[in-house]
Every structure is written in structure tokens, then in C-alpha cells.
Image: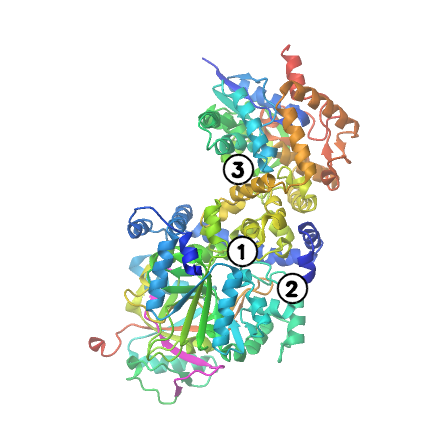
Amino acid sequence: MNAREAILGRLKDDSDIDIAAEAAALLGTPERPTVDGAHVEAEFLARLALPSVSASHDVIETIFDLPAAVARYLDAQGEARALCLPPDPRLAGCDWSGFALHQDAAPDEAAALAIARKGIAETGSLVFETSPQAPMLPNFLTLHHLVLLRVADITPWLEEAPLAGPQPRAHYWITGVSGTTDIEGTYVRGAHGPRFLHVILLRGDFPHMSEQ
Amino acid sequence: MTQSKVALFVTCLVDMMRPRIGFAAIRALEAAGCDVVVPEGQTCCGQPALNSGDTDHAIALAKQTIVALEPYEAVVVPSGSCGGTIRCHYPELFEHDPEWLPRAQAVAAKTWEIMAYLDEISGWKPEGVQVDAKATYHDSCSGLRELGVKAQPRRLLKPIAGLELTPLAGEETCCGFGGTFCVKYPAISNAIVGEKADAIEATGADLLLAGDLGCLMNMAGKLNRQGSKVRAFHAIELIAGMGDGPAIGEEA
Amino acid sequence: MSGAQAEAASFKDRADAALADRILKVAVERTAGTAEAKRAVAVDAFPDFQAARTRAAAIKDHVVAHLGHYLEQFEANATAAGAKVHWARTADEACAIVIALCKAAKAKSVARSKSMLGEEIGLPHALAEAGIGRVETDLAEHIIQLADERPSHIIWPAMHKTREQVSALFKAKHRTPHEEETIAAMAESARRELRTQMLGADVGISGANFLIADTGAICTVTNEGNAELSLVPPRVHIVTAGIEKIVPSMPHAVHMLRMLARSATGAALTQYTTFYTGPKRPGDRDGPEEMHIVLVDNGRTQMREDGLAEMLRCIRCGACMNHCVVFRQIGGHAYGGTYPGPMGAVLTPVLDGLKQSRDLPNACTMNGKCQEVCPVRIPLPTLLRGWREKSWREGLEPQSLRAGLSLWAWVATRPRLYRMGTSMAVRAMRLLGSKGWISKLPLAGGWTRYRDMPKPAAQTFMEQYRKENGR
């Protein structure tokens, strides 16, 4: 008997019940924090500003305003206009003149941009998945993490974060800057991941939305 | 008015170490209109055996206690831990015993911690009691978590004229008594009660009050060893108008 | 005390050493004390936390009741996503699987993100024995790796270390240590030190906070970013997880996640909640080529059979130990096992045997605070009392205690004899005291070493009552 058989052998379940139905019934209306559904953007921004999240933000009207917003942020931080950019077609129409762009992130990468699929107002979380257009490593190597998020993609609850259907390799929620309290319980930011998180909210739509 | 007939389960600690608490319980119950009986067959509820894992002796003592108490309408106990043993743990002890389980459940259902009984069942408040002092209250763990004793002592102490109740920081934090724990692991118990004693001193209170003699002896014993002037009583003593008597450790 | 000393000593010795350690006390208050305060704020702000606890407990009980079904579902879905699922009955089997996978990958070094299960199965030791370099990337795990110690808390493994102790360690061992004596500078030093090591590892090894049955995903809950940096670059990602980590689906995971960080640190979520489903996909720019998930039993199926099923609800939040008066005095190392505090007192007898660890269920006041704060309502005092019963039945309790309780019970079941005995005892005790107090009590030296005992009254209650009522 191998280990699998041995373990499963000790877990025999004679009950006749509909396990999936029982599991679903246990969820019901889950208890969760209050979020004003009529003002999700404000709620989301309020969570971003919490010391535990410590994310700054900016607002742009169209995707074409993105390079200017990034430049604003990097200049204010005293960083060069060099950016790690994912191969996402939604960014193709932007004018990045004046920027040094690259796709692969260095271990000491200064700034990387990513596009979040959702923003969760309940926690101020940003939701990402991996894909050929969305690498994961730059988002964790970089010192400054810049995240583009459509205002229309802000949703109240964590239940709305996951994708239905087949899963990508990684689905992850980023809730604030990297930090640790491992030494004497004292909080420091930028443990291994980004020390700075800057959310750029897009009021309009991504270009070529109808072609997606 | 027909009087409620209640049985007092005095507890082994009160019986041996501070009978005043038992008499205070009777006085308060009678003031609340109860007819109090002290059943002969009571000795110890069996908690020391229960908490040591000595199930056989725990069962023997539980059976004796059930027999002594079951003839009465209600059972009142001046201790959250003994009350908790009877109410919560007796039914567990007899879970697989078809003869004793219903008897245990019946006694459990009618057993009350003294202050919970006076406040919730009798709906009684002390009248004409005066104690000019500042007091702080420690919530003993069993009474708090097993029996929900929290608001009742405070409601009963409130009408006492001249008594100022000041909150104890960490009032729900265990004092480190834990029954046999304090003698099995004395150094750890001492560290815990040392912090509790500091918190009590920090209130500036004259009096320490609680609902369990074990906790009170532990805290008062530590306070006295430290040279503290804080005096300790079981809350029922003040409530019954016996707060002018000797505090714990003052009986010559 | 050093790791070796800790192994040799008894619980009492370790506890005594801990009680004498003023620095440890400060460290414990800064972490566990802060966590207690922050959790209280988070719980107060959460609507109906008590109902949420009941739901979380019900979800875990449901999973444990149907664990075989869910493990098979998880295995099927993880495999369909391209992961390889392995099964291990024991700690040794689990380590052997991991070592074999590392050797197959020709790994010279592995990057580890924090995993208590890894600690439980002895993975650090197994890797060392196999000559495989191990980089601990979580800051606290890095600290204890440098100090050659074991973790002392499940959320803050290095909570027993002061900043001065950490500073000295980093100055001795880091290539480019900090210059400023600030915690931020020390964290920077660790960030520099570990970066290239993390990115250069051949294999990344993690635990899992949750295993999602209906997608085959594993979930890691972290705050530093080291997990992602250790698990995404290497060619191989190995996960070791206890079989009880299963939840049925993502919505169930969401509910458990709402409970986890709040109970541990008072946060709504940790910074990084990451779900990995299989290895990299075609076209992905990063990610491992291979993903292996080792499902570990190591006593968990036994717990189900031994009346400890409720302990399998545990989501490893650490709230119980943060609120435990005993843990707050002695810290984590005194417990002598992988897991400290109340949950450790229940688990250690399973993992290390009751004979060796009988002190842990006994060194508890049964105050019930742990049960009150547990997000999944584990009846910890009841489970600890169960170990005490087992210990009694197996004759592991000291003879003096057995004799004392037997005598007490014998007398107490004979009320007439009891009355006589107690009357004599109070008179005898009164002889030992002056004024109202006794400061030395034979047979109860444990009490009077530290505190006074009030003198009993001249007669027992029953004596006085009988006199007053003419019996």
C-alpha cells in the first residue's frame, strides 16, 4: 500500500450527503466589513490611504495621460524616467518618449508598471493574474510599484476578486506596500517587495475595448 | 408569597478557608426572599480531580454531589469555577451514561453562581448597605467564560452607598491560580499573579473584589507578600452587608 | 539557551530560564501584546465577528468530515493544472520526497519561504543532511537561521530576539551590513543580503496557508514579498502542506482569509495573498517549469480518530498564544516543540508523544481565553483536559499527585469523615500562621514560596452552620 492509499484509507467517509451542496450552504451571506456600495471609489481610496496599506494615488481621464502621470510620480520621487513595462497591448497607444523602457526587471529595479484587473474597496487590494502579457516578477522586484486601475473595475468585496473558470498560473492580491514586523514587532516597509505603491486610476476605458 | 427553596453548595474552599462567604450568601439569599437549605451530603464538586484528568474520582464526587443537590428547586454556588464544574462539566462527565446523564443535566440546569442567581433570578438588589471605599473587580475566568458572570456582580455592587468601583486594567486576564496549576507550576503562576497584583495596585483601590475564593486567595496572598494595603473580599460579602468584617487574611 | 540546551532540558527548566529572561519578556510584550491590542480593534470593527467564527468553524468541520473527498478533488484539479501531487504519511517520508525532488533538479541551493509545516517535519535538518544549501528568505526565519535557533512563535519566529541581538548577527554575517542602528536599516541589509540568493536558487520551497479543492490552487499569505521572489524565479516550486489545509472553494477561502490576518495581527489582509495553480503556462514570462505539492499527514488522520478533529480546524493565526497568560510569561521556546502556546500544547503530544510532552497540557490555568479568541472556535481547554485524562490513564502523572487526589477523593466521598478531617485540617493550618497569614506551608511550598496563604477561620462553615442550626 502506498502513502496515498494509506492516507485515503483512513479517511473513508460513509455518509451519503451531497457534499457540494452542504459546502455551498455553509457560505450563505458571509459576515464582512461594511462597504458603501454607492461610493466604492471613495471607499477604495480610503483603504489605500490607511497606514497599513500606505499607497499613494493619482487620477487620469484617458490612457493617453498615463505617461504624464508616471513622469509626475517618478520626478516627485527623484527617480529617473526608466520603467519596466509589461507587454500589454492596452499600453501600446501611449507615448513614452523621454522614458527608458524595458520588459525584464532587474533585481534592483526602480519602477515597474502593472495593470490590475480589479480593485477591492473592502480592503484596498489590487487583483492581478499572470498571462503572456502580465509577468509577475517585476511587481515584486521593483522598489516603486505603479499600478493602473480602471475606476470601473473597483468592486466592493473580496468575493469578486477571483476569476471564474480555468485558473491562470498565479492569481494574487496586493494590499499595500511590502512590510514586516519581524524585529521587535516594529513595522518597517519595503522588506523584500516594493516599498512604494502608487495607484493610477483611469476614469475612462482602455483603448480598443470592443476588440477584447 | 411562597418562598423559593434554594440549596447552597458552599464549596470546599469556602467551607475550609472562609466560611464568612457562605454566611454572606445565605444572608443575601434570605434578603431576596429565599428559603436556604444547606444539604448535608456535600463536600467537594470534584473539580481538582476533573482538571487533573482523574475521571474516575471526578465521577465519584460528581455522583455524590448530584445526589445531595437534586432534591432542590435551585442550587446556588458562591464560586464561578465550582458552578461551572456542575453546570458545564457534569453533563460532559456522564455523556455516555444513560442513567446519570439526565440527572446531571437536571442539576446543571438549576445550578447558579450566587450573583447571577440574585441578579437574574431573584431580581434583587441590596438595600441600605454602606461601604465607604474604592474597590476594583476581577472577573474570574470560569465564572466569566463558562457562566457569563460579568454584569451581574457590578449591578449588585452599584447600589452600595459610598462604594466607588474603579475598573481594573486587564480585569478579564487570568490571575494565575488555575486550581492545581499554581502549585504544579508555581514560578509561572507567580509571574502571572505578580502582573495582576501590579495592575490591582495601579488602580489605587482600597478593596479587591471577585467571585471566586481561589482567585482571591491567590491575588490577596501575593498582594500581602508584597506589603500591599489592598484588602480582598468576595463580592457577596459586601453585597450581603458584611463588608465591615475582616478581609481575607485579617481573621486572627 | 542554545538549541542544544533547549532540547536537553525539561519544560520546567526551560520555563525557569524564560522567566528569568527580562529581555524575552520585553520582546513578547512588543509582539504578542501589540497583536492582542490590534486584534481587539479589528474584531470590534467587524460586523458580527461571533457569527463569522461559527461559520469558519463549520466550514473547517465540514472539510475534516469529508477530507478524503476533498483531497482527491484537490489532487485531480492540481494535476490537471500541471502540478504533481505527492503524499507523505510521516515527517520522514515528506522530507525524503522533498530531498529526492531537489536532487532530481540538481539543486545546489533552495530558497525557503516561511512554513511551520516545514519546521514540523524537520525539513531544514533534512536539507542540511543532504548537503543542500538552504536560504531562509522570510526575515524572521533568516534571523533564526543565522542564530541557529528554532522559531519561537508561529507568526513571529524571531520574536524572542531584540534589535541589539539582530544587529549583532547581521554585522557578523551579512556581506554589506547596516551602518545606522535602526530597524529599517537592518531590514535593508537583509533585503540586500537575500536578493541575489533568492533569485539564484534552483528550487523554491513553500508551505501553503490554504489548499483550494475545486481549483487545485495553493494559497500563500505573506507580507514581505519574499515568498513570491523565492517561488516564481526557480525552475521548480515545491509545496509542503498539511492535509487539513483544504478549503472547498475560493469563496470559502475568502471567508477564512477574512478571519486569518485579523486574528493574527489585526490587519484586514496581509500584503500578499497569492494563489498558484500549477506551473507556468505556455507564453508566461516567468514562473516555475515544475510544481510539486507534497500532502503531509504526520498525525493528522490519527487526530481525527483520537477525538482531536476540532484541532484540525486550526488556521495557524497565533491568536491563542498571543492571549495566553502562560505564553506571555514564558515565550515560545519553553514549549520545546514546533508549535507553542495553547495550540502547541494540543499538537505537541501528537507529534512528539505524550510522555515527553505531558507538561504542556498541564501548564495551563484553563482560563479559556484561547478558546474565546480562536477564529474557528477550537475548544482548546477541552482538548487539553482530554490529554490530562489520557496522561492519567497511562500513569504518566506524578505519584504524589495521584496519591494526594486519591486521598482527597476517598475522604470527600465520605461526608462524615470529611467533616472531621476538614475540622482538624483548619485547626492544624491555623497553628502555622501568625496574625491572619501563613507564610510557610509544608506540602504546598509551591504556594508559599511566592505568596502568603490566609489563615482559615477557627471552624469550618459546616461546623458553624450546624452549631447555629442546632444539628
Q: Mark 3 highlights which residue? A: B144
Q: Position of residue C270 (x, y in %)?
A: 46, 63
Depth check, front residue: B118 or A173: A173
Would residue A106 be counted in the magenta stretch? yes
Discs 1 and 3 share one subunit: no
Determine contact: label 3, label 2, CB under 8 Å: no
Query: Which residues are drawn in magenta?
Result: A101-122
SS assignment at label 2: loop
Discs 3 and 2 share one subunit: no
From this viewpoint, is residue C28 visible?
A: yes
Depth check, front residue: B168 or C60: C60
Would residue C44 be counted in the magenta stretch? no
Depth check, front residue: C142 or B27: C142
Give the alpha-carbon distance from disc 3 to disc 2, as whole Å. Answer: 36 Å
For badge 1, the amino acid type reads Ala
Disc marking residue C35: 1
For badge 3, the amino acid type reads Leu
Give the alpha-carbon distance from disc 1 to disc 3, as whole Å. Answer: 23 Å
Q: Earlier in the sequence, mark 2 or mark 1?
A: 1
For badge 2, the amino acid type reads Thr
Q: Residue at x 33, y 78 (%)?
A: C282
Chain letter for mark 1: C
Q: Residue at x 40, y 55 (%)?
A: A8
Q: Mark 2 highlights which residue? A: C162
Q: Position of residue A97 (x, y in %)?
A: 35, 89
SS assignment at label 1: helix
Q: Position of residue B74 (x, y in %)?
A: 49, 22
Is residue C365 shown left or right of residue C58?
Answer: right
